[in-house]
Image (cartoon, grey):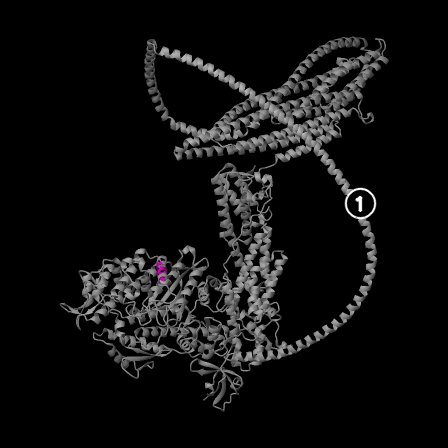
Amino acid sequence: MTLQELYVKGARIWIPHLENVWEGAVLDENYDPKLNFVNVTTDKGVKRRIEIKNEKELPHLRNPAILIGQNDLTALSYLHEPDVLYNLEVRFKERQLIYTYCGIILVAINPYKELPLYGSDIIQAYRGHSIGELEPHIFAVAEEAYAKLEREKSNISIIVSGESGAGKTVSAKYAMRYFAVIGGSESETQIERKVIASSPIMESIGNAKTTRNDNSSRFGKFTKLLFTNKISMMSLTGATMQTYLLEKSRVVFQAPNERNYHIFYQLCAGRDKYPEFLLAHPDKFKYLNQGQSPVIPKIIDEDEFNETLKAFSTLGFTTDEVNNIIRVIAGILHLGNISINAADQESCSIASNDLSLGILSDILSLNKTDLLKWLTTRQIESINDTVLIPMNKATAEAARDALAKHIYSKLFLYIVKTINRNLDMGKKDENFIGVLDIYGFETFEFNSFEQFCINYANEKLQQQFNQHVFKLEQEQYLKEGIIWNMIDFYDNQPCIDLIESKLGILDLLDDECRVPNGSDDSWIVKLNEKCGKYKHFEKPRFGMTAFLVKHFSDTVQYESFGFLEKNRDTVSKELVNVVQQSDVDFCRHLMLLDEKNDKTKSLQTGTSSLKVVVSASKLQTLPSKQHKQTVGSQFRESLTQLITTLHSTTPHYVRCIKPNDDKEAFSWEASKIVQQLRACGVLETVRISAAGFPSRWSYEDFYERYRLLCKRAEIVDWNVKATCTNIVRNWLQDEDKYRFGHTQIFFRAGQVAYLEQLRMELRRKYIIIVQSTIRRFIYRTKYLRLKRTALGLQKYSRGLLARRKANNLRQNRAAVQIQRFMKGWFVRTKYINAKKSILAIQKYGRGYLARKRFEKTMDNYKATEIQRFCRGFLARRKYNQKIRQIIIVQCCIRRFLARKKIKILKAEARSISHLQTKYKGLENKIIELQQKYDQLNKENANLKIQVSVIPELRNKADCLKAIENELKVVKSALSDKEDQLISVQKSLDRERDEKMTLLDEKTKDEENWLIERNQFIIEKEELKQQLSETLALNKNDENEKLREAEINEINQAYHKAIKNKESLESENVLLKQEIKRLQMIISNSNDIENLRTFGNEEDHGYSSQKNTLEKTKHHDSSVSEGEFFSLPNSNQSSILHNSTTPSIFERKLKNFFRFSTNRNSEDQTTSTPNNSPIHNQDATVLMLRLRKLLEEEKSKGDSLRNEIDRIKRKSNTSISEDSIKLSELEVENEKLRQDYQLLRNSIKRGVEQQELEAQYISLVEELKRRRDECIQLRSILSQQSQSIRTFGNLDSSTRSIDNSELMEAFQAQKLANKQLESELTALTEEHNMKLTEMMREIDALRNEKCMLESIIQDKLEMENGIDPTILRQKESYLRLELERCSAAYVDSQEQLNIAKNQLIELQKCSNILSNRLKEHGLNDSILSSNAIGNSMAGVMKKKAQSYQGILKHQNSDELKIVQRLVHELTPRIAITLLPSLPAYILFMCIRYTDLLNADDQVKSLLTNFILAVKKIFKSPSKPEARILWIVNSITLHNLLKQYGGNEEYMRYNTELQNQQQLKNFDLSEYRVVLQEAIIYMYESLIRQIQESIKPHIVPAILHHDETARGKSRRSQISESPSAENRIEPQSLIDQLDYLHKQCMFFGLYEGYIEQIFQQLFYYICAIALNNLMLRRDLCTWKTGMKLKFNLSCLETWVKKQKMSDSIISPSSPLTEAALLLQSRKTDADVDSICEICPSLTSAQILKLVKSYTPDDCEDTISPTFIEKLSVKLKEIKINDTSLNETFTMDENHINPFRVIFKYNDMKLEDIEIPEVLKIDNLVTKI
């Protein structure tokens, strides 16, 4: 692009101006190279002609509007001085932005006003952001330095420079504050507080008021902040400080309107704290009143002094050290007030009574005489003698002032070294960030040695800066891979050589100081001779006392007066010795401070400056011949070390600018600012940048801005870089004007402005096209709308007329229908009302009559009762009167007899015989007393022996205590053992009776068996004789026939025997099973009581069967005994033992009778004469059969006999075992009675009655339960008897047995019922007796309780004067007894649970018995009653399984319980359990400790739980784990409230829950501790969630553009193909949704969920709004549109989750910011803007408005609009004091967490402990 194309008509340029340096103008015509001038019109409308000699003198072009106000000056398209100055002016004056980048430099302009830019919220906002992401700030530079320190572990330096009053000290202080905040840690003894506290101290002793600055630093300072790597972050561990060139002359002299150092004025303001130093107002001291300006506006010296003292304390200064420092400062003030009087021209004097001299001597403990001497005289040393020479007044005052300066410099050095010692922690492997606060370039009308040193230092720093800038620029080009040419920059090395080279200015100055008679004039002569060859050195035009140096920023003239004196820095050696000989150790230490440093330095540097002389006798060390080092040499060495340090670090630069000399807020003086920009190197940086490619755009940003210049065909899909290349090459033909780097496009100066102009023209063209299209669309739409309106009116009018006609017809028809229905309704209503009235009259009339009758009856009854009570009262009163009268009569008679008797006794007492007997009795008593005395001596000896046995007795007492603990368990089983003992005794009696009856029957059966056996033997003998006879007769004839017949009979008998054997074996198996069952019932002694019914049923069945047997024998008397006993023995045993099968026995008898009758009939039919062979054959067969049967029965009888013997033995052993158990139970019973007596005694000693009443209540409940069981058993028996009565009325067709069998069964059942009834009555009587006994015991306990209460009350009244230690011992003993009783009660509860479990087992046995009753023919009514019994048993079972919601545990297992509940429980397991189950378990354990009244246990339990949960929150853990324990902690807190006994929280409790309240503990304090722990957990959870969502907030809320097409998709896919890198609102919503699901999974209450998400939405708003405030590039109309859409996504998610709308309310400031960005900003919109932004502060509104960047088609915001808006906001602020002046939101703010009480309907007794928790062996549910 040629110059003719740039300098055209209307081009905006800069022209020079005398006052404002530069002025804006516009070309009136195109530039013509042939003409040597251009015509312009200034911005003020003035026509001017600018002369131009060549093209290089053309005026500077102005940047386009889009580039005005850029954060970085190097981003300007035209980089030159006027645009840099204008950009800074716009940012400073219009937008009130004090910070601006200029490449690597941060330009800071002093606003002379407090701005809300340095709060902790701003620090957090810049934390983690790289430089350039947010608005320029000192914190951004500090964050960049700290990030580089963390990333590269390299040393960093921040160089803060500028002239006096530019704000260097404040900038350095804020940088150090940033490092202290982000690098500090509590474990490092608050080192960051010490670093911050060093600033007030150094400001007080090193800063002073000047004409340019109220807080001017009069020394240079380089502070190293030391960092150590700890857990992947750099932590601040210490600091060191190095100072340069303190202005000592200010101690004794101040120019007008200036002050001395602040510490002097602060001390005078706080003089009341140190009255011993005799201080006064500053005007009373010479060293403070020279400037005539003792006060600084808006500064209170006393407050500053308090802050300084506080800082001393923070930095570790002891009280003595601070007092000594104050002492020295006060001494300096009094030293200046010493009055020196001139005696003559060559001498002076000081009055001996000078007040200041005396005060100084007293304060510093100096020798007053010596001090007076050496203040007026000086000593000259010669070779052999010393000479005292008096000093004139001027010389004496100079010596005095030199001493003051010397003392103050020593004090300053001491304070700095002490600060370094306290800040340096002495750790190794430390990196540092150095902050250099050094004076800027200075030039005044009179420039002396101080200005020369300052400007020399700035020359060195500027050289280092130039080299670093050039290096960075070179590295940037190499990194991007572009071709560039070497840039020429200014090198100030020749100026530095002039100052510090050999024979340079400093070298010549030192040489002149060494000359004895050296002077300033002679030094100037040498300078002109030696330095004239340097081009940077010049002589002044007039005079020979000055010289000129051409520095990089300006030429400065230095006056030589005072150079040598200031360089020497001499002080009277004698005065120093006077101070060194002070009695104050601190003063001596100050004077020796330099010497110690010299020694230390010499030891470190070795022997280079020493000469060692070795001789035979000793080793001598001689000092060097070098003189004392001058100030210039010291400064040059320290400056060289500083530059070396800076070269070894990565520097960052802060250039502070002073905008005006009047210290007015946001006032701009262009000429002064330009001078400073030139001096601090900002313009040099701009020049270097402009020489290369100053404008740099990333491909994304360039495409976003200039894609309008590219045609659709030239856009390369998915390749932004190629598209940008096409755009640049199409519009910029000269390839030297740009370069394509790897990530950026580089443009030379002016090219971006050209592209911007092209974009603006093309956009204007497209806007016109769009406007025309929109206008056509609007008018066409308006026409179509009017047409539709007309047609619609016609259509609806016609329809209206038709509807009206149809409506009339419908109304007429409806009226007729309404009349019909209304008439019917009236009639029905009338009838119904009449009916209701009649019924009501009848009802109330009948009720009235009934009430009258009832009242009359009640009156009669009450009258009768009154009469009854009155008559009784009269009778009792009459009786009492008679008794009283009788007693009076008796008393009178007894009194009469007593008086009579006493008269007789008095008469006897006067007699002599009575006195003799009395004396005789006294002698006997004396003898008895002597004997008793001897006996007491013996007893005393015995007691001494017993005292020696006391330790053994104490050991036995400890053993007895252990035995008492064992007795606790025995006591708990007392009631159960007594019941079991009674039941066992009864069962034993019953079994004993049964077994006796069995034995009697057995003896009878054995006798009968012997008789029958004898009969069998006789018959056997007879049969043998008959058989022998028949054999002898028929031996030969009938041998074969007999054999055949015998074989047949044997076969038949064999088959019949087999059949009988099989049937008997089956019956035998049944009988054996029944015997085993009976044996089990007998052996199970613990179940005898609960099986009474079963045993009684068995006994009654046996007795009923026995009666049936007797009746059968009597009825069938024709049956012979032999035939009966021929039955198998198993049948007999079954008759004796089987009571459940009576029909089997009857069937056997009938079969036998049938068999015998059949045999008799067969015998009768086949009977023949005796000689018949057939008859003989039958007889023989019969005998053989009977013999065989007899042998079989014998074997079976023997087996049965053995079985009976075995049963006897077993019964005997069982009886013996039962007797043993009975004896053991009796012994245990006796022990329990003794324990019970001990318990009663302990109760008499003061044990509380609460637990005994609880036991009484439980016994009453058990009694009621047993009474209910008796009632149920009675109902069952009545139903059984009723069923038996109805059993005989059944139809004969439905029964399968005979009437006789039914009657027998009925009689047997009747007897059984009678016995059951008798047993039931006995059982009820027994229970009633127990009840009466328990009631008596309860009454006795109540009486004992009342008696004990009265005794305790009496004892308390008597023991008011007793030692409180005894009372505490008794109280502790009572507590131990109460705990012991409570433990016994818990053990009894466990025994009760065991008994209940046994009851369940017995109920199962009862169900078995009911099933057997069903098997034996009971009907449906009995079964239904049995079902009722089962249901009752089910109820009893439920009752038996009921718990109290208490978990018993051992104190030693608390840590294990907490470990398994808290540490070992993972969220994955917890999500499968009952919500808040650990909290319920822990509370049930607390209830157990409350039951034991163990305060220490509940304290340890809650403390361990809280510590365990806090440990989880302190360690890295996932959010779900933290949510889990927040939920459990809140639930536990609610349980402590709900069951804590507070009526406020008991209103919704059930009766059972109120009974489960804590009895002994008031856990309000623990609730407070738990609530604080919950708040801590909530804050930890919130911080963790905030850290996790923070990276998603800004991209999702501010960056995401849903309306973007093409660009966003291409860029995202080309740079990050994976979808994971795309951050949209959905990613933030996913984070919130995951958190919401976790809260719902773990059962967190909705109120708490709302609090969490309200806090998160506040945090989202704070992060997004702070970024919006600190990023000017986002303050656009488009960002407002993005905000609206992205916030609507969050609102949609909230509605989807059905949460309250209040959750989204904290984000209202962000919504209002979006509205503000999209609203119009004219003067008429001020009120509307204030209305739409109620949640934004005035500072936030102004910040957004000032940072707003209008688009090309928008008008710029006028200053008048901002002024009106500020006025309006101030009015609102006056009305509303709650508005804040800060424009950022506090990101660390967490809303207070409200712990809400929520009623819990969970039943503690229903909670089951799952096995997954692994605490079954640690806790027991009771």
Above-or-below relation of 29 to 1420: below
Q: Is residue 598 visible?
A: no
| Magenta part, dominant SS | helix
Q: Which residue is mark 1?
A: 831
Q: Could you tell me which residue is drawn at 83 percent across and 26 percent down? A: 1293
Q: Residue furthest left?
A: 384
| Start-end of magenta stretch | 304-309
* CA neighbours of label 1 inside 10 A, class few (<14), some (14 to 19), many (20+): few
Which residue is most to the bottom? 34
Q: Secondary structure at mark 1?
A: helix
How far from the left and from the top, in percent, is residue 994? 65, 19
Q: Look at the image and say whether residue 101 sits in the magenta stretch.
A: no
How many numbered marks, from 0 up?
A: 1
Snapshot quadrant of residue 843: top right
Residue 501 image offset from top left, x and y in percent: 31, 76
Which of the image's four quarters has the C terminus?
A: top right
Q: Which residue appears at 67% of the width and 21% of the height?
A: 1318
Q: Of residues 1694 and 853, which is closer to you in this image?
A: 853
Image coordinates of residue 955 in percent, x first then y, are 41, 29
**Amino acid carrying mark 1 in the image:** Tyr
Q: Is residue 305 magenta?
A: yes
Position of residue 92 relative to residue 266, above or below, is below
| 1132 or 1310: nearer the viewer | 1310
Image-based side of 384 in relation to 1568, left or right? left
| Residue 258 shows in the view | yes
At 34% across and 22% down in the image, what residue appears? 940
Residue 784 picture quarter? bottom right
* Of the pair 1548 and 598, the residue shown nearer to us: 1548
